[in-house]
Image (tube, rainbow, N blue to C red):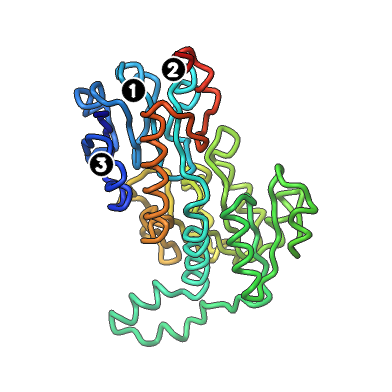
Amino acid sequence: MSVVLLSHRLYEDGMQVLELEAATVVANSSDLRNNLDQARDADGIVLRVGRIGRELMESCPKLRVISRPGVGVDTVDVAAATALGIPVVVAPGTNQRSVAEHAVALIYTITKNVLESHLKTAAGDFGIRNKYAAVELAGKRLGIVGFGHIGKETARICKNNDMEVSVFDPFVPAPVAEQLGYTHEADLARLLATCDILSLHMPATNETRNMFGAAQFAAMKPGAFLVNCARGEIVDEEALHAALSSGHLAGAAVDVMADEPMQPDNPLFSLPNFIATPHMAALTRESASRTSRLTAEGTLAVLRGERWPHVANPAAYEHARWKK
């Protein structure tokens, strides 16, 4: 029986699938270097939280598959995995509705000043209602940066709630957005200058890390809001703190931060116009069930020697170990 090491347990539906064919070991750690003895015995690794680099892979002679319950693979050295013939299994299309709904929930929460109003009311300050911090969203312009599955679903929900939508994505032709009734912006600076709410939906890559910093926040409309359900690394948090503290940005709501798990001493948490949730956008019951099952099925398929189609690195199948 194959051995699969998990950084953390999958949702129970996925665990049931995985345990049908594999012996599972749960590390409960985001740094599997602290579990080298277990990793060396593993035929597969399922990484929910943490990172896997070449050094760890090369320390695991039995390792045949790495799986990510989602589509983000920025925490895995995919190039190293490919060179070693290790497919990196992903779970595409399982969480787009859940993440889009979470982005919309954050949009409403931050623009209606829900958190500060709750805290003040609970402390006996009924007068917070007279701050008039909330804004109406009908007719406001949402800027979507990253027009993949999640960006598209977020745009659709917001347009159906009477918002205008502008899209920036250099990999998406203008007609794709325009046919859906959205404005396509080829220039990011123009989108920043015209949107009332900016929602980020791109992966963390060398090109997108710290893509949104002081210059980009300064280019945004005074009083605009930022929502990030993508990756924490794409935002310069020091610059975000400055923009929120000065009042240039009215608020920010994020599900991701550069340092996860989020650290409570992060200066952003001291601001009344900042909200964070613990990277939970994809963790609805429905999405967790779909994602965990697809992740488990893919992991087992690769361990059986099958060329599972949902991998981040199909070139891994060209490795000599797959020609046997």
The answer to which of marks 3 and 2 sits earlier in the sequence is 3
Position of residue 57 in the picture relative to residue 141 (left or right): left
Of the 4 image quadrants, the one containing the C terminus is: top left
Residue nearer the viewer, 48 or 169: 48
Residue nearer the viewer, 216 or 209: 209
The image quadrant of residue 191 is bottom right
Q: Position of residue 195 (x, y in %)?
A: 67, 63
Numbered circle sitting on residue 63: 1
Residue 215 seen from this side: yes
Mark 3–mark 2 distance (CA, rounded to whole Å): 26 Å
Secondary structure type for disc 2:
loop
Q: Position of residue 313 (x, y in %)?
A: 52, 29
At 25% from the left and 30% from the top, the residue drawn is 3
Q: Amino acid at mark 1?
A: Leu
Contact between labelled residues 2 and 1, with CB atoms less than 8 Å apart? yes
Q: Residues within 10 Å of mark 2 (few under 14, many from 20)?
A: some
The answer to which of marks 1 and 2 sits earlier in the sequence is 1
At 22% from the left and 39% from the top, the residue drawn is 26
What residue is pinned by disc 2?
84
